[in-house]
Image (cartoon, rainbow, N blue to C red):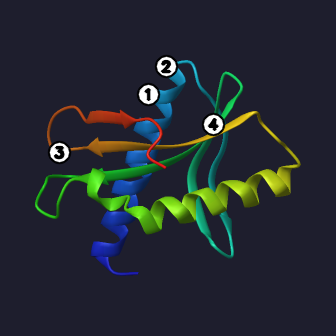
Amino acid sequence: MTATARQRESLGAHGETVAARHLVEQGMVVLDRNWRCDVGEIDLVLRDGQVLVVCEVKTRRDMTHGSPHEAVDATKAARLQLLAARWMEQRGVRPPEVRVDLVAVLAPAAGAARIDHVRGVA
């Protein structure tokens, strides 16, 4: 693994930790992290009351490569919905509602991270 890939992986892991902490502070319960199957990966699976939340976390140091919000397009949203169905099938759960959220984390090299939680992106 290259140094750049390690840095990107480390930044992503940091962003997921920041996002999970923020969501728990908002009253959600983390059910799974970095769940994988042949279709892809879910960063965070949470429960928000009776709603199952599949959460994509996008972390950036700056806006050079665009906003984290731009990373979840229609194709990514459809994949997240498919992943949610796979996760529920594997776990044998049927919640009354499923929501796909995005947590955008802007984590500059110095200073506190800024978090934007967007509910229902798909």
Amino acid on which disc 4 is placed: Leu
- Rendered position, 51 above or below 121: above
Query: Where's residue 28, x and y in %?
Result: 59, 25
Mark 2 Cα-neighbour bin, 10 Å: few <14, some 14–19, many ≥20: few
Q: Distance between the residues labelled 3 and 4?
A: 26 Å
Answer whether labels 1 and 3 touch (C-beta < 8 Å): no
Amino acid type at circle 3 is Pro
Circle 4/circle 2 CB separation < 8 Å: no
Type of amino acid under label 2? Gln
In primary-sequence order, the first of circles 2 and 3 is 2
Residue picked out by circle 2: 26
The location of residue 30, given as percent across then percent down, is: 64, 35
Q: Which of marks 4 and 1 is in front?
A: 4
Camera-side mark, 3 or 4 = 4
Q: Do the residues labelled 1 and 2 touch (CB within 8 Å)?
A: yes
Label 3 with label 4: CB-CB less than 8 Å:
no
The residue sitting at 30% across, 34% down in the picture is 115
Choose between 88 and 74: the one closer to the eye: 74
Q: Residue 22 carries which label?
A: 1
Q: Which mark is first along the chain, 1 or 4?
A: 1
Question: Where residue 60 is drawn, which disc sits there?
Answer: none
Within 10 angstroms of label 3, few (less than 14), some, or many (20 or more) residues?
some
> Marks 2/3: CA distance?
23 Å
Looking at the image, the residue that sits furthest to the left is 64
Residue highlighted by disc 3: 108
Local crowd size for mark 4, using a 10 Å CA cut-off: few (<14), some (14–19), many (≥20)? many
